[in-house]
Image (cartoon, rainbow, N blue to C red):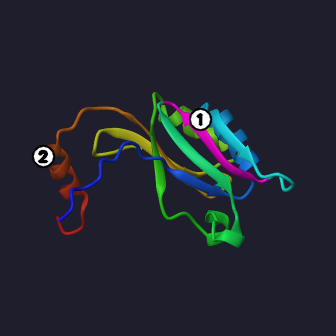
Amino acid sequence: MREPQTIHEVFPYLRVHDAKAAVDYYRRVFGARVRLRLDEPGTGRIGHAELEIGPAVVMLSDEFPECGIVGPRTLGGASASIHLHVDDADALLAAAVDAGGTLLRPAADAFYGERSGTLRDPFGHEWLIGHSIEEVDAAEMQRRYDATMPGS
């Protein structure tokens, strides 16, 4: 059996309808900084962009259906979410909704020691936004999780 490769970095790569608007939204809501942007000549589509959101880099592009690259709007929903751990989940959720996002789950205190909520951005991607409210070790978290499950 071969040795596994070393993974040096992992980047979420978002495919969106109207990447220019997405870049603007992520800048206004999450404070994203554009690190790199490549525009497709003649069409205005963003072929590739790299956004710094806090310490992370998120990559994105416009949809390129002719290459099989489509986003949540074309697919009819998102299959994953991105979790941002922030100072104040309530405030960021409110700002994201004010900027055009849709609140899917309001912020609430959770058994795992976080206050969090979920929103869908105007481009169909889902974001779990949370902040820490207490430190919970793995055994206590499992006990609390078990207590929330039906049949417990």
Return the residue at label 1: 30
Q: Which residues are magenta?
A: 45-54
Relative image position of residue 76 (x, y in whole percent): 62, 71
**Badge 2 density bin: few <14, some 14–19, many ≥20, Cα 10 Å:** few
The residue indicated by pointer 2 is 139
Outermost residue, left side: 139
Three-letter code, disc 2 = Ala
User: For the point 77% across and 54% down, which residue is it?
Assistant: 45
Q: Secondary structure at mark 1?
A: helix
**Majority secondary structure in the magenta region:** strand
Instruction: Indicate the position of residue 47 as horizontal and vertical percent values.
Output: 70, 52
- The answer to whether 34 is drawn above or below residue 2 in the figure is above
Alpha-carbon neighbours of circle 1 within 10 Å: few (<14), some, or many (≥20)?
A: some
The single residue placed furthest to the top in the displayed view is 87
Closest to the observer: 97 or 72? 72
Dots 2, 1 in contact, CB < 8 A = no
Q: Residue at x 61, y 30 (%)?
A: 31
Q: Is residue 104 visible?
A: no
Tag on residue 56?
none
50 in magenta = yes
| Residue in view at x 71 percent, y 45 percent | 38
Q: Position of residue 143 (x, y in %)?
A: 15, 51
- Depth check: give the residue in front, 126 or 8: 8
Relative height, residue 90 to residue 20 (above, below): above
Give the left or right position of residue 131, taking residue 37 as reference: left
Of labels 2 and 1, earlier in sequence is: 1
The residue mark sitting in front, 2 or 1, is: 1
Is 13 positioned to the left or the right of 145 in the image?
right
Q: Quadrant of the N terminus?
A: bottom left
Q: Left of 33 or right of it: where is 4?
A: left
- In three-dimensional space, the C-alpha distance between marks 2 and 1, rounded to whole angstroms, equals 33 Å
Res 122 visible: yes
